[in-house]
């Protein structure tokens, strides 16, 4: 299978790879030297992989990317990656650190442009599922 992400910009490639729960795609995108939320690239990808495997075990194979904005990080792109089957979701802000490094972090302050009933179980890395969503 051809790597479809090589023809996209970094943000589009991240969204494509994250939506498809593609750890090898994310591995190729992220910088080995950058620290992601106090974790190395390898540690962060291990945590993401655990959550993706939990979702796949439930029959979830795709997370719908919904572009939104953060109230705190106005200049950065934000996405809710939503499982439309059971309501699991990740809230991610993308940050262009430099021309070679794409950063990302989690955010609970994304604009709520989607129906709250469809967002039931926030997955917060590395801590797993939060059933009691704080908003």
Image (cartoon, rainbow, N blue to C red):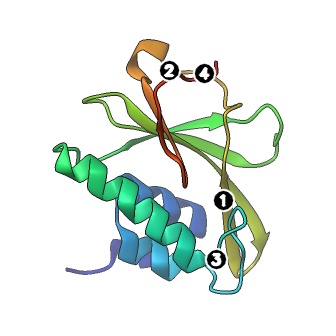
Element type where label 2 sits in the image: loop
Instruction: Please report whichever mark, 4 or 3, sits nearer to the chain's N-terminal start.
Output: 3
Label 2 vs label 3: CA separation? 32 Å
Label 1 vs label 3: CA separation? 12 Å
Question: Disc 3 designates what residue?
Answer: 40
Element type where label 4 sits in the image: loop
Q: Is residue 61 left or right of residue 113?
A: left
Q: Residues within 10 Å of mark 2 (few under 14, many from 20)?
A: few
Element type where label 1 sits in the image: strand
Element type where label 3 sits in the image: loop
Question: Disc 4 designates what residue?
Answer: 112
Q: Which numbered disc, 4 or 3, marks the residue closer to the eye? A: 3
Q: Is residue 108 left or right of residue 113?
A: right
Q: Which numbered disc, 1 or 3, marks the residue closer to the eye? A: 3
The residue located at (47%, 63%) in the rendering is 47
Instruction: Please report whichever mark, 2 or 3, sits nearer to the chain's N-terminal start.
Output: 3
Question: Disc 1 designates what residue?
Answer: 104
Label 2 vs label 4: CA separation? 6 Å
- Asked if 59 appears above or below 110 in the picture, the reply is below
Label 4 vs label 1: CA separation? 19 Å
Question: Disc 2 designates what residue?
Answer: 114
Please tell me which residue lies in front, 112 or 75. Answer: 112
Please tell me which residue lies in front, 11 or 123. Answer: 123
Given contact means CB atoms under 8 Å apart, are the residues at marks 4 and 1 in contact? no
Label 4 vs label 3: CA separation? 30 Å
């Amino acid at each position: 299978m051809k790597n479809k992400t090589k023809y996209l910009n970094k943000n589009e490639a991240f969204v494509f790879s994250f939506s498809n729960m593609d750890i090898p795609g994310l591995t190729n995108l992220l910088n080995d030297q950058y620290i992601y939320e106090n974790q190395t690239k390898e540690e962060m990808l291990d945590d993401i992989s655990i959550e993706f495997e939990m979702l796949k075990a439930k029959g979830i194979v795709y997370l719908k990317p919904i572009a939104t904005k953060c109230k705190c990080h106005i200049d950065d792109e934000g996405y809710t990656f939503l499982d439309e089957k059971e309501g699991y979701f990740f809230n991610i802000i993308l940050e262009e650190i430099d021309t070679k490094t794409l950063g990302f972090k989690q955010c609970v302050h994304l604009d709520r442009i989607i129906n709250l009933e469809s967002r039931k179980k926030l997955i917060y890395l590395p801590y797993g599922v939060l059933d009691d969503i704080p908003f």
